[in-house]
């Protein structure tokens, strides 16, 4: 099957051929007009020359002998024919023999005679006291010679113009065609679904700048379109994945909550039978509290907007998270510290926020490892509130840095990749985002909430921590 691209019309041909055709048409029109004007001008010059010579000889009284006529022939370039004054027959002159034989018949034309040597304009000098009359014949230049003389400059200019224009036009249109072909291939790639961030830019495309031409701006527009489509597809995929994940998490959390309820009842029953002061059961209860927080996080992932918003004291929230993960830090040999801005309160959903911070803290404990340290930090400025967890572990693997927030993405051998998804969903439900960075050997994950979440001091004083 033939390649469909081979049947497409070339941009070079569409641009160059019409220009060349217009130039050639203009040259042909110029040649025709110049030929017509040259013919008329040649005839007028010959007529004027014949008339002027005839007038000058008629005004003179010089005898028009054969010697004089030969001299006038060489001097003026005209032919002279002596005619008998009464019969009008040719009696002599400077015409060549073939022209002299054809002259009587050709002389019947008014003002013009066509002789074997070519057309001539005729003017008559009457006898007027001379023994014979004389006809003056001025040769009319051949039309081809007159036309060539008239159009030679136009032809030379047209030839020079075409010699310069055609190569330049071909080079310019080929460059434009290459750039447009690159954009066409890029658009076809986008139409086929290849508009991810890694899609190659169109070849031969100049870097888009504000001062670029229309093709540069078109290229930039296509790139922006590809980026917008890629972002839209990512959001659609992420939204669908989030919906499915929420359904899965809600079902899993429901079953897990039933198990936790049974475990807690069994531990409470056992604590009543055991002697007072058994700290192992208290530790077990605290671990159950942590698991319950993770269950709340999964429920928040499935139904992020179900809980009512309340005024949350940030320092109390940090303290609660600290108390929940303290036992895990002790068991793992990880140091735990906390710092929060005094008097800071926000409006939000307490349990989802606490569950998100617990997930971040548990990840940080695993990342720090024995001998490491974890720090809970809450700060506020003019841009919003930051609820952050820092650790001095090695940080996430480089190959996962761009997809850490996606569900089921994890760098831990036994992880399932839901902790950051839970935290990200909670942050988005509060109008913020989950951000992370690594600097000076420490990794920092933070729930960044907008400034409108901050509660004025007067309202915060009346809230229950």
Image (tube, rainbow, N blue to C red):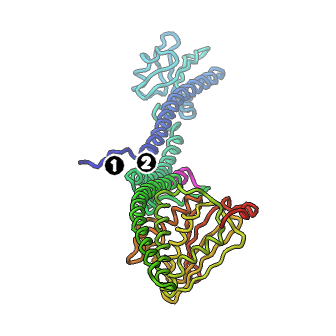
The structure residue drawn at horizontal position 65% and vertical position 69%, both measured from the top left corner, is 314
Pinpoint residue 293: horizontal percent, then vertical percent: 50, 69
Secondary structure of the residue carrying numbered label 1: helix
Judged by depth in the image, the label closer to the viewer, 2 or 1, is 1
Name the one closer to the observer, 116 or 140: 140
Secondary structure of the residue carrying numbered label 2: helix
- Does the magenta-highlighted stretch encompass residue 461? no
Asked if disc 2 and disc 1 are in contact, CB closer than 8 Å, the reply is no
Residue 85 vs 97, above or below: the answer is above
Name the one closer to the observer, 313 or 81: 313
Q: Which residue occupies the extreme bottom position in the image?
A: 371
The magenta segment is 212-219
- Does the magenta-highlighted stretch encompass residue 218? yes
Pinpoint residue 389: horizontal percent, then vertical percent: 57, 75
Pinpoint residue 280: horizontal percent, then vertical percent: 47, 84
The structure residue drawn at horizontal position 40% and vertical position 53%, both measured from the top left corner, is 185
Tag 1 residue: 5
């Amino acid at each position: 099957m033939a390649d469909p691209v081979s049947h497409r019309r070339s941009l070079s041909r569409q641009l160059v051929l019409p220009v060349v055709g217009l130039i050639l048409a203009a040259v042909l029109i110029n040649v025709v007009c110049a030929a017509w004007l040259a013919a008329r001008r040649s005839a007028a010059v010959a007529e004027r020359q014949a008339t002027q010579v005839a007038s000058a000889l008629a005004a003179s009284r010089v005898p028009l002998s054969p010697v004089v006529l030969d001299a006038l022939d060489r001097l003026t370039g005209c032919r002279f024919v002596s005619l008998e004054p009464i019969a009008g027959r040719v009696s002599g002159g400077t015409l060549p023999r073939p022209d002299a034989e054809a002259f009587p018949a050709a002389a019947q034309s008014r003002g013009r005679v066509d002789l074997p040597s070519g057309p001539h304009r005729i003017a008559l000098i009457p006898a007027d006291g001379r023994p014979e009359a004389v006809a003056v014949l001025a040769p009319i230049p051949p039309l081809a010679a007159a036309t060539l003389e008239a159009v030679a400059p136009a032809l030379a200019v047209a030839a020079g113009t075409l010699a310069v224009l055609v190569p330049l036009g071909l080079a310019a249109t080929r460059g434009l065609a290459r750039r447009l072909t690159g954009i066409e291939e890029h658009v076809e790639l986008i139409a086929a679904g290849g508009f991810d961030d890694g899609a190659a830019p169109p070849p031969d495309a100049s870097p888009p700048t504000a001062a670029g031409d229309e093709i540069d701006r078109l290229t930039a527009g296509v790139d922006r379109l590809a980026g917008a489509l890629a972002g839209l597809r990512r959001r659609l995929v992420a939204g669908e994945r989030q919906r499915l994940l929420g359904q899965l998490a809600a079902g899993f959390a429901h079953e897990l909550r039933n198990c936790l309820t049974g475990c807690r009842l069994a531990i409470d029953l056992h604590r009543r039978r055991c002697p007072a002061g058994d700290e192992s059961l208290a530790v077990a209860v605290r671990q159950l509290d942590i698991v319950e927080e993770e269950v709340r996080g999964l429920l928040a992932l499935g139904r992020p907007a179900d809980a009512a918003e309340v005024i949350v004291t940030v320092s109390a929230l940090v303290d609660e998270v600290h108390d929940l993960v303290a036992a895990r830090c002790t068991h793992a040999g990880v140091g735990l510290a906390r710092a929060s801005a005094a008097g800071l309160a926000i409006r939000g959903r307490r349990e989802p926020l606490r569950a998100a911070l617990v997930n971040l803290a548990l990840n940080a404990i695993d990342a720090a490892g024995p001998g490491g340290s974890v720090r809970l930090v809450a700060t506020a400025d003019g841009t919003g509130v930051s609820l952050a967890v820092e650790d001095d572990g090695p940080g996430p693997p480089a190959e996962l840095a761009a997809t850490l927030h996606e569900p089921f993405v994890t760098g831990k051998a036994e992880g399932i990749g839901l902790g950051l998804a839970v935290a990200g969903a909670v942050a988005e439900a509060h109008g913020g985002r989950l951000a992370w960075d690594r600097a000076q050997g420490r990794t920092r994950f933070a729930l960044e909430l907008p400034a409108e979440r901050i509660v004025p001091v007067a309202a915060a004083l009346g809230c229950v921590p």
